[in-house]
Amino acid sequence: MELRNKANRIRLFSFNTPQMRAFHFSWFAFHLCFFGWFGIAPLMAVVREDLALTQTQIGNTIIASVLITVIVRLAIGVLCDKIGPRKAYSGLLLLGSLPVMSIGLADSFETFLLARLAIGAIGAAFVITQYHTTMMFAPNVVGTANATSAGWGNLGGGTTQILMPLIFSGLLMLGVSETLGWRLAMVVPGVVLFITGIAYYRFTQDAPDGNFDELRERGELAEANGEHGAGRSFLAAAKDIRVWALFLVYAACFGVELTINNIAAIYFFDHFDLTLATAGMIAGLFGLMNIFARTLGGVFSDLFARQGGLKGRVRWLFIALLCEGIALIGFSQMHVLSYAIGIMLVFSLFVQMAEGATYGVVPFVNKQAIGAVAGIVGAGGNVGAVAAAFLFRAEAISYQQGLFYLGLAVLVLASCALLVRFSPEVEAEEAQAYREALGEESGAGALSLR
């Protein structure tokens, strides 16, 4: 899919162009989805007491929260190819807000599990975010655009760790009981998600020159059927070994981030004997690194591409994953709180840079099936989170041991990045497209405050 008039610069404080409106709405919507998706995580110590949950049951709810996202991410990518990211995102936000608001109705492990399963669908927002920015930005900044929009979205995993305990505490100050407080707190992100879904439909468009249905009417975009249909698109992506290599790579970075988002607060609460608010604040630091860390992953991907082309992007991805695994093993061995916080921040930096580096590669694997590739790779992150969750649901394995084993797995999976290769023809074609997109800009991954 080749679209015209893609932006070759990211002007952060501009809302006048469709490219920048898509950029800002996509990261903000994903941020809110993350907030709703993991809003219950920092309150799990309270929910555990209210619903009398065991560690195994908590582990099962963590699995449920990420398992359904695997299926939805696979479907949402090809749906974007068919109806466009604007309609796909709006629909996901509106429908996803309902289980977020209604999780407070849960009164048993079973109903709580079903609620977390339903909420997990909004995690598919990531695929639409990456798809929409890929549609809007040129090769010289697409890595930076994808990484920044996703990173600021993932930032929701940090803000929810900080804000949800504060919302909960505020409700308690008003005289609400703990049992009712965690239930009412979840209504807040649900309402905001619903409002954002309406705004997304009203203020964004699918591509620089219009929505997909308009482009198809003008003959500027192929119809989503036959050779360009969803089935063909998905099969083309599924037959490519590079897609599955990136699937495993994303399992080793985003899957790890999802796992930490789910267990960090309760890990610090139990392991270091902290209060719920303090544990949430510290856990929130992990997610808050997204404000710049994932962007750095995309920036370095674009810079490595300037010097080494697509091979450069792949080399950077391997380096980021290797450093992530080493830092995670180090974090698992920390027994002093200050040291644990410090190494957690280093680990957070590399896990998020690895995510940005992954989606610095994804747009170039198959341009005729961008949605399918983005969906399969994105699903890999959730598969990784599901696999990791089994480490933390077993009563015989402590959270600290689980983190150590997870670090070893990351080191092994880092080698998968080296399986992603491109033909000399594609390398040459993308190098030329990069130079043309760069034009008179001063450097790759250009960001502007104008």
Image (spheres, rainbow, N blue to C red):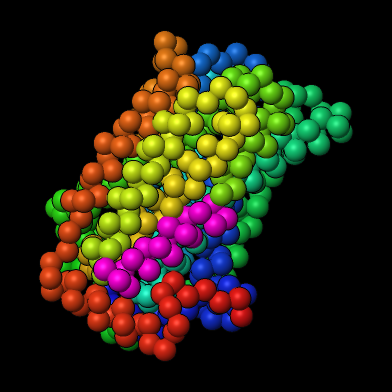
Q: Who's the residue at 64% across and 36% down the image?
A: 282
**Residue reaching furthest right?**
174
Q: Who's the residue at 52% across and 33% down the image?
A: 262
Q: Is residue 210 above or below residue 39?
A: below
- Split into 4 quadrants, where in the image is the N terminus? bottom left
Q: Is residue 283 visible?
A: yes
Q: Is residue 270 above or below residue 445?
A: above
- The percent coordinates of residue 230 (x first, y second) are 24, 60
Q: Who's the residue at 30% across and 50% down the image?
A: 318
273 falls in the magenta region: no
Of 261 and 411, nearer the camera is: 411
Q: What is the tally of numbered marks visible in this picture? A: 0
- The percent coordinates of residue 424 (x first, y second) are 12, 70
Of 376 and 308, nearer the camera is: 308
**Residue reaching furthest bottom?**
440
State which quadrant residue 414 falls in: top left
Q: Is residue 283 left or right of residue 429?
A: right
- Magenta region, mostly helix, strand or loop? helix
Of 361 and 127, nearer the camera is: 361
Which span is picked out in magenta?
290-308
Q: Who's the residue at 50% across and 34% down the image?
A: 260
- Split into 4 quadrants, where in the image is the C terminus? bottom right
- The percent coordinates of residue 267 (x first, y second) are 56, 25
295 falls in the magenta region: yes
- The percent coordinates of residue 34 (x first, y second) are 54, 46
Q: Is residue 42 visible?
A: no
